[in-house]
Amino acid sequence: VLGCDLMAHERSTKIGIIGAGSVGATIAYACMLRGISQRISLFDVNKEKVHAEALDLNHGLQFVPVATVNGSDDVNVLEHSDIIVMTAGAKQKPGQTRLDLAEANANICRKIIPEILRVAPDAILLMVTNPVDVVTYIAQKLSGLPTECVLGSGTVLDSSRFRYLIARRCAVAVQNVHAYIVGEHGDSEIPLWSSASIGAISLDQWVVPGHGQLARSDRTHIFDSVRNAADQVIAGKGATNYAVGLAVSSILEAILNNENRVLPVSSLLTDYRGISGVCLSVPCIVNRRGVDAALPVPMNVDELAGLKSSADRIYKVVHALGF
Ligand code: NAD
């Protein structure tokens, strides 16, 4: 029996989540529902909160694929995690931008990264805390881990909001829309309209029943809605959690199942269309190694200029923080 237990243990994977707030707890819930990992551990400095979230999740274990869920205010609960998901930190209050959180959340990283390296030295780090591109860069520098092992959830969520809005406007299933938001997960992000497609049809050629092709005003409206999506949700309920929980669980699945999935995650770029030394999102191959390759997706002149100015904006914040 012991041998079987050991074998089962050796095969099982573990996700460690830092922060059991709205985002961390919902990521755990999404992972549980989808059976992404056999072991999920939550760590938070708020003991009551992390115990309560773990208890509530445990009460639902009967209804999901076999898993164990732990929660603790002791960082050792994250020991031997295959992936650590970082969600701890300040979140936007109405009227704040993500970049306003940079200093507070950089300080949390300074404290927590050495702890992560001690308890889970082989883990891949997936940063979700905002401003996620800045936090990903800081985690990369502080950890000294190989570039491919540190990534941020980036514009996976923004791209999913973009696809949802295109799908609705074009009266087609969201699963058939291919379209990416790249750059900062924040105000300087860029929609890649030039490569957006539905099925194998370029979005430029798509005819909306009773409307014709998407007008410039349609595109402006869609992109404004993507950029303001978080503010809209935060104004109504104080936090965003469901879509980010599902987006992050998809990234975790792509990593743990070695899927080679194409996802616009944030990673440290080196000579990507002339951009180096900054973390931001472009479509990448994601697998058990982490971020395997940034793909040379087609961009028109305006899109590329937008990506470069987004990179400059992130670089300035990182630089101001002393990194
Ligand atoms: P929240 O306030 O609900 O939860 C944050 C949790 O972090 C709290 O439970 C707090 O106790 C904990 N915490 C603080 N310092 C800690 C430390 N040093 N160690 C361990 N735990 C600590 O906030 P939330 O709504 O869950 O948001 C968390 C972060 O995720 C924010 O920065 C938010 O902006 C970000 N976020 C990112 C995305 C994305 O797409 N990247 C989407 C939504 C939210």
Image (tube, rainbow, N blue to C red):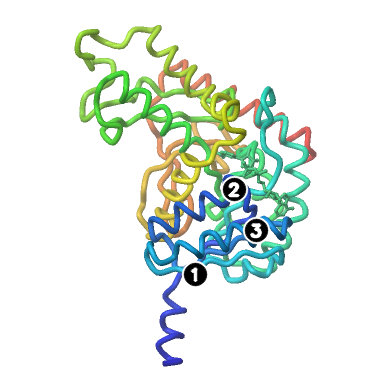
Does the beta carbon of the residue at mark 1 sit less than 8 Å from ligand 1? no
- Which residue is label 1 attached to? 68
Question: Which mark identifies residue 52?
Answer: none
- Which residue is label 2 attached to? 127
From this view, report whether residue 5 is shown above or below residue 279: below
Cα separation, mark 1 vs mark 2, equals 23 Å
Q: Which of marks 1 and 2 is in front?
A: 1
Q: What residue type is labelled 3?
A: Val
Residue closest to the eye, 286 or 146: 286
Tell me the element at label 2: strand
From this view, report whether residue 22 is shown above or below residue 84: above
> Where's the N terminus, which quadrant?
bottom left
Does the beta carbon of the residue at mark 3 sit less than 8 Å from ligand 1? yes
**Mark sitting earlier along the chain (2/3):** 3
Q: Which amino acid does label 2 sit on?
A: Met
Do we see residue 287 in this rendering?
A: yes
> Where's the C terminus, which quadrant?
top right
Q: What residue type is labelled 1?
A: Thr
**Labelled pair 2, 3 in contact (Cβ < 8 Å):** no
- Disc 3 residue crowd, few under 14, some 14–19, many 20+, Cα 10 Å: many
**Mark sitting earlier along the chain (3/1):** 3
x and y percentages locating residue 272 in the rendered image: 50, 35
x and y percentages locating residue 310 in the rendered image: 59, 25
- Residue visible at 40% across and 7% down? 217
Residue closest to the eye, 289 or 166: 166
- Disc 2 residue crowd, few under 14, some 14–19, many 20+, Cα 10 Å: many
Tell me the element at label 1: strand
- Residue visible at 65% across and 26% down? 313
Question: Which mark identifies residue 50?
Answer: 3
x and y percentages locating residue 114 in the rendered image: 73, 60
